[in-house]
Amino acid sequence: MLAFDNCTELERWQDLVDFSQEMNRDGDRLHFTFFVSGINFIEDANRNIYQGPGQRRGYSRINFGGAADDVRKRVAYVNELHAHGHEIASHAIGHFNGAHWSAAQWEQEFAAYRGIVENTGAGARAAAATLDVLAGKIVGFRAPYLAAGPGLYEALRRDGFRYDASGVSFPDQWPQKRDGVWRFNLAALRIAGLGRATLSMDYNFIVAQSGGRANPRRAEAFKQQMLATYLEYFRKSYTGNRAPLHIGHHFEAYQGGGAQGIRAPGVRAA
């Protein structure tokens, strides 16, 4: 299972459209999940339609969607991928740490997300940029910063989400259904040749390998460490209990794009 979080940069949308089309030329065999931050669908000029729980109006921890044309292009990419069977899921809106939010606060965020998807109220974007994804079909969630708490799971259940991908577990653990919501957890891994703990997520690799800062001189070595780690993760699952692999990446070129460079071999191996 390969997913991407936040999903802002237009060039990365195009990259993944091209890659999935290439991989699926001889059959419909590869699909991604995109945990899209709702902020991506709000034009900068309309930022005041959003107010996160306990936050001032018009504020987000990440950038809003940009100019109207940026949002229009992003919506077009989402519609194209959705039409070809890729999943659009939720990454909330303003990328806040909601670990201590109550269920009511999460429900406020989810209601705002539905409104953005449906472009209701004052309007997040130009009317011409219409999402083909129905809000009721968005049933997967990953919390920003993986900051989950009791309030989140109560709200997910109430709001009809089928699964959450914010947790962490052993690499050989199968997804489990708890309190009515499936938990598709990221895997706790050890980096090959380094031994440091990380998660099956690109951001966690760069933190473990170089303290969260890109190191161009070692970028190739870090890329090979990530590839070796993921291949070992695959081999242990394949020869073990066949628990599905869960890899979560972002629309960021961490470590000079090393994670992007291993994308094709990683998918082919799976």
Image: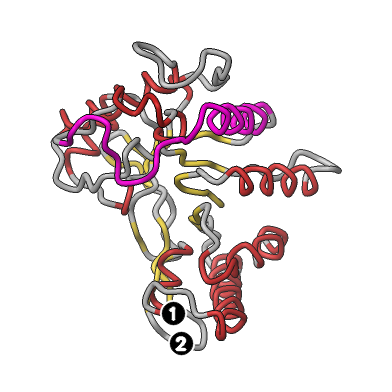
Foreground of the two, 121 or 225 = 121
In the structure shown, which secondary structural element does the residue marked by tag 1 occupy? helix
In the image, residue 197 above or below residue 147: below
Which amino acid type corresponds to the residue marked 2 in the rendered image?
Leu
Q: Position of residue 94 (x, y in %)?
A: 31, 39
Q: Tell me where the magenta segment starts and ends, as one range.
A: 55-83
State yes or no: residue 65 in magenta: yes
Q: How is the image coloured?
A: secondary structure
Q: Which residue is mark 1?
A: 209
**Image marks 1 and 2: residues in contact by CB distance under 8 Å:** yes
| In-image side of 132 versus 21 (left or right) | left
- Few, some or many residues within 10 Å of mark 1 (<14, 14–19, 20+): many
Foreground of the two, 220 or 123 = 123
Q: Which residue is mark 2?
A: 194
Instruction: Confirm whether residue 104 shows in the render.
Output: yes
| In-image side of 87 versus 265 (left or right) | left
Q: Position of residue 197 (x, y in %)?
A: 37, 77
Task: Please give the label number shown on residue 198.
Answer: none
In the image, residue 159 above or below residue 211: above
| In-image side of 23 versus 209 (left or right) | right
Q: Marks 1 and 2, how far apart in space?
A: 8 Å
- At a point 52% along the width and 34% down the height, the residue shown is 88
Q: Position of residue 29 (x, y in %)?
A: 73, 43
